[in-house]
Image (cartoon, grey):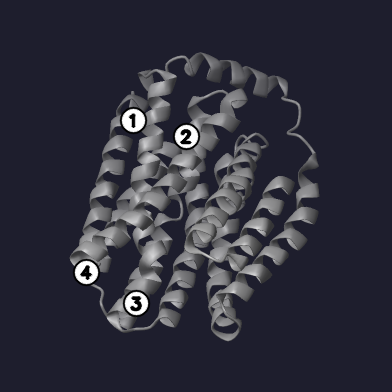
Amino acid sequence: LMLGAVGLGLGFVGAGLAGSLWLFILAQGLLLGLLGTSATFAPLVADTSLWFDRRRGIALAICMSGNYVAGAFWPPVIQHFTDSAGWRSTYIGIGIFCVLTTLPLALVYRRRPPVLTAGAVAAQSRAAMQSERPLGLQPATLQILLSVAGVACCVAMSMPQVHIVAYCSDLGIGAARGAQMLSLMLGMGIISRLVSGWIADRIGGLRTLLLGSLLQGVALVGFLFADGVTSLYLVSAMFGLFQGGIVPSYPLVVREYFTPKEAGARVGTVLMATLFGMALGGWMSGAIFDASGSYRAAFVNGIAWNLLNVGIVLFLLAPAKR
């Protein structure tokens, strides 16, 4: 976390001072992404999954709601400072803020997960036996399928999250409205994550993942028919409420079908796939818009990727039911 805080600070400040597009991209990718985000989100989620057993779903949901709280709060603030002070000063200010807040907070996590109890040791032994053929598959096969599912769902998820501001500008609604819709979307995602965590503790990670993916597909279809301010606000809220529980389901599935000692690497790998999906989907949607001149084709592309995710989860659920 301390390494990530320094990476975030250096990345934002470096991007704000960049003199060319390539320096800006390197600051974003190497410092913000490789050094900053990667050293915070995935390891924090994996570590949190080791502290809880019966209510692991809601615990992970609370942990993973942090980025949605930030996503609901920051866009209007950033839009305000970008309009008033310029994007460079805003970037530098964010970098300083990240270092001043995250470094002290990182000290909270000095403690390691508690020593396993006798009951937890027995559960770990059962998990070790199960992980030899999780869901009747080779562990590597299950890992690959979960990673592909993560890429697919987040390619679909990225279309509204990454492009809602540009989409509103394209419709003549304005970037400020788009920033408000993004805040609404991510704010509703907080509720979605908490509710999905509660649901996951009752029906399991795979079924929660399927539910979230199906509902996300419904919301994506809704964007095809929303072209006014009111309808876009409604669909943005619906999208946020439907998709927030998808990504937290992946660490739950990993902890259900792999041993605790593998949590760090396997959770990190799946979350890496979801982030890659967000990056791929954000770029792909922009490329489709550039080629077609319309965001409708980009939404259709997102729906197709979402169907791929649903298909993989249904395939995994068949042996899970047996």
Residue at disc 3, secondary structure: helix
Q: Nearer the viewer, residue 304 or 121?
A: 304
Q: Which residue is mark 2?
A: 253
Asked which quadrant contains residue 102, the reply is: bottom right
Contact, mark 1 vs mark 3 (Cβ under 8 Å):
no
Disc nearest the viewer among 3 and 4: 4
Amino acid type for the residue under numbered disc 3: Cys
**In the displayed structure image, the side of residue 90 where residue 168 appears, left or right:** left
Disc with the residue nearer the chain's start (1 vs 3): 3
Q: Which residue is mark 4?
A: 294
Res 77 seen here: yes
Residue at disc 1, secondary structure: helix
Few, some or many C-alpha atoms within 10 Å of disc 3 (few <14, some 14-19, many ≥20)? many
Amino acid type for the residue under numbered disc 2: Val
Disc with the residue nearer the chain's start (3 vs 4): 3
Amino acid type for the residue under numbered disc 4: Ser
